[in-house]
Image (tube, rainbow, N blue to C red):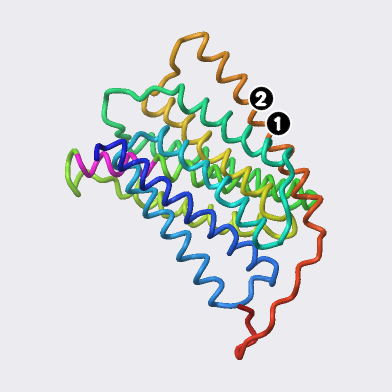
Amino acid sequence: MGSLGWAVVFSLLSAASYAVAAVAQERLAERGHRGWSRWAVALLLTGAGVALHLLALNFGTVAVVQALGTLTLLFALPIEVIRYHTRLSRAAWLEAALTVAGLALILALSVESEAPPLLTDSSVEAVATITAGVVFVCSFAGWRSGPRLRAVLLAAAAGAAFGIASVLSKAVLAAFTTGGPGAVSVTAATLVGAFAVTGYVIGQLSYRGAGLAAPLATVSVTNPLVAAFAGVVLFDEGVRFGAAGLVAVAAAALIMGWGVVGLARRSAASAGAPVPEPVSGPAGEGP
């Protein structure tokens, strides 16, 4: 199997892990973030997704790996249907398909530079400063908003943090493979962990009171978009077909936005539905 094949396999496994982790995170939020076993399950699933994602980045480009990561949304929707014993309407499936199709088109049009994706310390610090500012603004605005908008803004902040963590991970892996451990930037490696943890915590909070679809759709869109944009700026990745490619990207962004808004609306409507209380176990925790 070639490098692209391994990138696809690891990305699919990563997307599945993230989808199940999202469901575990929502269950945890519904119960007031109580129960160490629930925290452990959500953290382990997220960690598995991160590890598989890093493996995929080692074999494929940022654009390809992040595009495949949007399949998390499709994996999670049937999980939600099974869990709540409900049906997704044809419109909901259409909105999910529009979200993924628009994003996939944007990322499919990106072109990787032939140069290794290496970053200087000054570039890493600039990226970290900008990302921290965006995450802070989105989080602050989210806490002052209603449940639906708060979930979207927090998920957008989490997606931005995850996206930059992936970009920095690609740079760290490139430095390691080209120059060995001594070539790896300690600053970049530290920021990978910092942004990944930040994204996890804020993402956990985004699921509280807004259901699964809206925050998951938002983080699934924001993460690869931020990573793809950073790839263009930092790694000299471009767009295929020149002006025609830019027009196609703009159209794809509109299609993707339509899907996300639709999913957020449906999630807000279903968030008020009562959720059955679990039967308490010996330690007071549900199943």
Please tell me the numbered disc located at residue 52: none
Query: Quick check: is 195 in the magenta stretch?
Result: no
| Residue 187 in view in this figure | no
Using the image as rendered, state which of residue 123 and residue 216 is in the foreground: 216
Q: With 236 as the anchor, is 265 left or right in this view?
A: right
Query: Residue 82 placed where, x, y %?
Result: 65, 60
Residue at figure coordinates x 56%, y 43% from the top left: 220
Which residue is farthest bottom? 282
Residue at figure coordinates x 47%, y 62% from the top left: 45
Please tell me the numbered disc located at residue 254: 2
Residue at figure coordinates x 60%, y 46% from the top left: 157
* CB atoms of marks 2 and 1 within 8 Å: yes
Q: Which residues are magenta?
A: 168-177
The residue indicated by pointer 1 is 258
Marks 2/1: CA–CA distance: 6 Å
Q: How many numbered markers are drawn?
A: 2
> Mark 2 belongs to which amino acid?
Leu
